[in-house]
Amino acid sequence: MPYIRFGYPDCLSFLVSLADTVDMQRTGDDVLISTKLYESVRHVQTLVQVQDAREPAGRPSASQLPEAVLENILKLVGEDDVHERVLRDAYCRCFGLSLDIEQYDFAPLEDCLARVRLAANNATGLPQAIVAVLAEYPECIYMSLFTEAYARERGRTPTSRSTQLVRRWSRLFYVQKLDSSGDFILQPGVYSAAVLLPPEFLPVLSSVHVTDSPTVLTMALLTPESESSLFLLRVTMDHFYGPVAFGPPFDVEPGLYCAELCSKTWLRAHVVAVTDHVMQVELADVGGRRSVAAHRLRILAPRFTDLLALCTVATLTLPPGTRACCDTVGERPLEMTQGFQLAYALTGFAFGSRTIKDSC
């Protein structure tokens, strides 16, 4: 007992002061001591708290990039080198975020790139190793077992976790999750013309035909070769984010790639919530919200935001016996869409022997 340390001349005086910790009973010349368990624990905690705690010896640490920032930069410079003069712009275009390395104590951008290139050199040959491991499991393999399978096939453990490998080389994996409470399933990533189906084009022009009751208004489809705003949007975005610019590091056409991911068409959206790896967006053209991985988002140039809202295929049944529908045909789609903006053109209106042409 370190009783002298707490200002007591002998052990008995120290024990007498612990009335809340021990019970003392005198038996002749001796003293019987029994503990009070809960009081003893609290008292020991108090004694520990009053002792002078020594600060752990600190050691200087080098500047470190956050894991997400490092992975994003590795995607840009890990395989195909990007000059530092265009790195910030390429980072913003690809990931939708600004690259502010000064807040991580990297004054010049060259120091940051040197650290990133060092990490990239340490991972040389890793994509080829991943492809070789996935080829051994053509059916599927669980993500939780991928590291073990990699070590068994290659004879060494990968330098990164499975989730980091999937995020960094997403084009090498085809990821599925059949059960919301289950594990992710990994398969070899194959993006070919047979997999990436052409997008389904939505109409802008609409042809309206009215007959006797029940009256039916139909918006007809357009051919992909027509000058629809959706077709122009896809062509322009493919050119803007294609290989001619500093676009995403895909081996396929960006328009077809995003068409496969986003219900076979480009969807405009506004970001409303941000988490670590998933962003919640509000769809501008069809309404509703959706959770999207951050790497699937692209920043739209201002000229894309000025386009009209994209149209959807619609069939509208008018009330039977309606004779004055030519006066209200422009209001019916708005009523059907509950006030949501619907861009369309009324090219023909046939009723009996009359044909009325109008545009909205």
Image (spheres, rainbow, N blue to C red):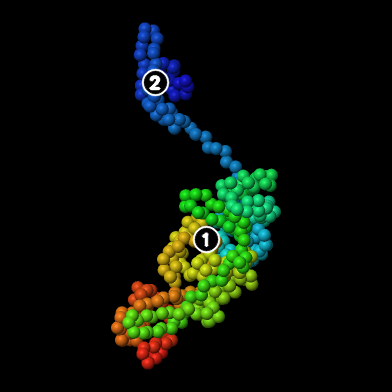
Distance Cα–Cα, label 2 vs label 1: 59 Å
The residue depicted at 57 percent of the width and 76 percent of the height is 235
Provide the residue designation for mark 1.
294
Q: Quadrant of the C terminus?
A: bottom left
The residue depicted at 65 percent of the width and 45 percent of the height is 151
Instruction: State the residue lying farthest toward the bottom.
Output: 353
The image quarter in which residue 326 lies: bottom left
Look at discs 2 and 1 and give the one toward the viewer.
1
User: Where residue 202 appears, x then y in whole percent?
Assistant: 48, 75
Identify which amino acid the numbered label 1 is placed on: Ala
The residue depicted at 57 percent of the width and 38 percent of the height is 57
265 and 137: which is toward the camera: 137
Residue 93 seen anywhere in this rendered image of the structure:
no
Residue 273 seen anywhere in this rendered image of the structure:
yes
State left or right for residue 130 relative to residue 177. Answer: right
User: What secondary structure is found at the residue carrying circle 1?
Assistant: helix
Tell me: residue 259, above or below residue 104. Answer: below
User: Where residue 176 appears, x then y in whole percent?
Assistant: 54, 55
Provide the residue designation for mark 2.
35
User: Where residue 296 appears, x then y in whole percent?
Assistant: 54, 63
Identify which amino acid the numbered label 2 is placed on: Thr
Which numbered disc flags the more N-terminal residue, 2 or 1? 2
Crowding at dot 1, Cα within 10 Å, few <14 / some 14-19 / many 20+, comes out as: some
